[in-house]
Image: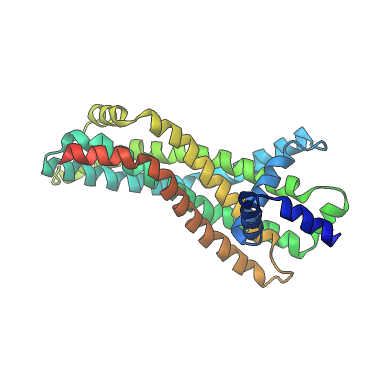
């Protein structure tokens, strides 16, 4: 048998050997194992033993837990964040004479970059940690092994609904965050201007703000409004499930797994955002040359 394996190995070309070794290297690392877990979860959607009713119920429950229950705190954070951005952008752009770029700056800060990241951080800190605790407790109590013994695929029953529901919730919450930051942020800013007697010397109307934002949004923004939340949602839920499924059989390991889940989700989200933002690099350079 060993001789046969060696002969087959010798038949591989150099690129095939390098690809094979790279695959083995990744699968032995946590990041590669998380990619494998994601692929197994996606593949389980097309399993022959699927139950549409059970899967739909689990996905809806996960979406409700991730999206609806986090909405109050997300709305407060988005409102305060949007208020700060609107005040700072309008006041700064008016002082330096670039009032025409108010919409572009708000789109970049809220819709393109910090909006999706803050939404991902909130979901990772709340829903991701809760998901790790839930599945980790099942692992410690041997409930995951019991599912496998009964013929239920734990990946399909636990990971797949969390992955799909998390991505859907992340997409919905990202839209709500951006909308709340703009609409509620405008209302709070307008109220602050009225209460303080416009001591900040800010001229702001909804017609002006909405027109500037709509003129600044491009087709690429609409693409990344969909792509970024789905990517972040997949990263957060996959990482949370991976940390839970690989927990040691000790209840004291649950807090450690939760902290690893949250911290690594933050790290992976930032790295993914940097990679996705490379596509904006040319646009940023063009805008910078226009300003200069």
Q: Depth check: give the residue in front, 3 or 81.
A: 3
Residue 191 as seen in the image, left or right of residue 5: left
Residue 197 as seen in the image, left or right of residue 213: left
- Taking the spot 24% from the left edge, 38% from the top edge, the residue there is 287
**Does 200 appear above or below 182?**
below
Query: Residue 169 sits in which quadrant?
Result: top right
Query: Residue 156 sits in which quadrant?
Result: top right
Residue 153 visible in image: yes
**Does 173 appear above or below 250?**
above
Q: Quadrant of the N terminus?
A: bottom right
- Taking the spot 74% from the left edge, 59% from the top edge, the residue there is 138
Residue 118: x, y in percent?
43, 50
Q: Depth check: give the residue in front, 36 or 169.
A: 36
Residue 112: x, y in percent?
38, 41
Residue 70 as seen in the image, left or right of residue 27: left
Residue 159 as seen in the image, left or right of residue 201: right
Q: Depth check: give the residue in front, 123 or 243.
A: 243
Q: Quadrant of the C terminus?
A: top left
- Taking the spot 44% from the left edge, 53% from the top edge, the residue there is 270
Residue 131 visible in image: no
Q: Depth check: give the residue in front, 291 or 149.
A: 291
Residue 111: x, y in percent?
37, 39
């Amino acid at each position: 048998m060993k001789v046969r394996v060696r002969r087959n190995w010798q038949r591989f070309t150099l690129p095939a050997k390098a690809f094979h070794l790279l695959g083995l290297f990744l699968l032995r690392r946590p990041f590669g194992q998380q990619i494998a877990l994601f692929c197994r979860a996606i593949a389980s959607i097309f399993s022959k033993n699927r139950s549409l009713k059970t899967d739909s119920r689990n996905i809806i429950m996960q979406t409700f837990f991730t999206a609806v229950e986090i909405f109050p705190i997300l709305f407060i954070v988005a409102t305060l964040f949007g208020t700060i951005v609107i005040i700072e952008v309008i006041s700064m752009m008016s002082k330096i004479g670039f009032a025409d770029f108010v919409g572009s700056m708000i789109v970049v800060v809220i819709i393109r970059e910090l909006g999706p990241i803050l939404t991902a951080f909130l979901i990772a800190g709340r829903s991701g940690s809760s998901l790790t605790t839930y599945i980790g407790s099942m692992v410690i109590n041997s409930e995951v092994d019991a599912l496998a013994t009964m013929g239920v695929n734990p990946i399909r029953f636990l990971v797949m609904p969390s992955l799909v529901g998390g991505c859907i919730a992340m997409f919905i919450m990202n839209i709500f965050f951006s909308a709340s930051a703009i609409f509620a942020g405008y209302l709070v800013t307008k109220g602050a201007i009225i209460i303080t007697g416009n001591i900040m010397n800010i001229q702001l109307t909804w017609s002006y703000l909405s027109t500037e934002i709509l003129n600044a949004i491009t087709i690429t923004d609409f693409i990344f409004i969909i792509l970024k939340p789905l990517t972040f949602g997949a990263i957060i839920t996959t990482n949370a499930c991976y940390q839970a499924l690989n927990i040691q059989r000790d209840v004291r390991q649950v807090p450690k797994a939760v902290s690893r889940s949250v911290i690594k989700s933050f790290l992976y989200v930032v790295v993914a955002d940097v990679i996705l933002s490379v596509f904006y690099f040319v646009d940023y350079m063009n805008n910078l040359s226009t300003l200069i």
